[in-house]
Image (spheres, rainbow, N blue to C red):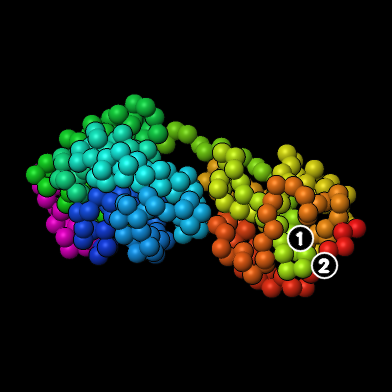
Amino acid sequence: MIATQAELISWYLINGRELPWRNTKDPYLIWLSEIILQQTRVQQGLPYYLKFSMTYPTVQHLARANEEDVLNLWQGLGYYSRARNMLKTANEITTQLNGHFPQSYQGLLKLKGVGEYTAAAIASFCFNEAVAVLDGNVYRVLSRLFDIELPIDSGVGKKAFKELASAFLDRKQPATFNQAIMEFGALHCTPKKPDCFQCVLSKSCISKARGTVNLRPVKQKKTKVTQRFFIFSVFLVDEQTIIQKRVKKDIWQGMYEFPMEEFDSKSKQSEYLEQNRKNILFQTEEITHILSHQRITAFFIFAKPTKEMGFFSGSGIKVNRNQLYRYPVSVLTDNFLKKTNDLSFLLFDENVN
């Protein structure tokens, strides 16, 4: 096992990517990078990290930020609860911990939005605490290296992998080893078509010897995908349009959108479009927007404002069409706005029918 640990570290020192958060021991910057990279690939997350670290260079700067500004900066990353929790945690650290991050794994776990993986990453990278990280890359490397059949998403499996990761950790240099095993999973021991014949761990890999590499890791649960049906109504009167803030605990909480109706079936969505046909000047083609556990079928309709369909009433706010960029919106809405960046053809006067 010691030889395998050394081989991993040696591979990492030669092949590891140059990433900005690897050149710091600042727990704020490490925390920021780990929150951004949850469920986000490095290539996508890197520009966000650079923008955030420039806009909010310290935890105190972030704590003073406005939620809408943070969500606007986060726009496009998805999983917006990460951004809201990050802001709450920055406030907690600033007001309750005198601006200092806890310097232990157990202390870090007490912070809102900081789970076992993030706490282990900060504790090992910043304070060299001998605690193992366990993310998707590490699960994959360990499951193949030791040919483990236990599902990684089962209680028994999670416990077994946690114990194995801890036992496999190089306790003399936990920060470097943790970075090495994660990077090895990300770049070499990939989910599909790993290069087992050019692998520094090939002699130690039990899955390679048994021919089970493509069967590891094992998962027991299939993600249930929820179908949802949305229609967004775009009104434009004298350069102004209406947007609403999503306040319920749901996808895109805290983001803005055009007035939206949700339907519990495709047929009811189609029925609404048909019933309001006389007030619809134009509608987009059907849009399919896929999230991790949801599949959204959506239409954006350009609607002539009427008393029935609204414009001057309701909980929405009026904004100038040229000021929409100031408001954080979902990727779905952002893509729509990019495709229809000139809404001037849809101008009405204030004569509501």
Instruction: Determine contact: label 1, label 2, CB under 8 Å.
Output: yes
Coordinates of residue 8 in the picture (x, y in percent): 17, 52
Chain-order first, disc 1 or disc 2: 1
Start-end of magenta stretch: 1-16
Quadrant (top left, top right, bottom left, bottom right) of the N terminus: top left
Q: Which dot marks residue 314? A: none
Residue 211 relative to residue 348: left or right: left
- Report the Cα–Cα distance between label 1 and label 2: 9 Å
Q: Is residue 5 magenta?
A: yes
Q: Is residue 145 above or below residue 16?
A: above
Residue shown at 82% from the left, 67% from the top: 348
Task: Find residue 334 and report its image quarter.
Answer: bottom right
At label 1, counting other C-alpha atoms closer than 10 Å, the crowd grade (few under 14, some 14-19, many 20 or more) is many
Circle 1 is placed at which residue position? 235
Coordinates of residue 60 in the picture (x, y in percent): 32, 52
Coordinates of residue 315 in the picture (x, y in percent): 70, 47
Instruction: Say which of 73 and 78 sits in front.
Output: 73
Coordinates of residue 50 in the picture (x, y in percent): 35, 64
Q: Which dot marks residue 348? A: 2
Instruction: Say which of 137 and 339 sits in front.
Output: 339
Instruction: Say which of 238 and 74 sits in front.
Output: 238
Instruction: Say which of 287 and 70 sits in front.
Output: 70
- Dot 1: element: loop
Q: Is residue 340 above or below residue 86?
A: below
Prevailing secondary structure class for the magenta stretch in the rendered image: helix
Residue 34 relative to residue 347: left or right: left
- Dot 2: element: loop
Residue shown at 19% from the left, 54% from the top: 25
Q: Of the residues shown, which amino acid type is indicated by label 2?
A: Phe
Camera sees residue 180: no
Q: Of the residues shown, which amino acid type is indicated by label 1?
A: Phe
Quadrant (top left, top right, bottom left, bottom right) of the C terminus: bottom right
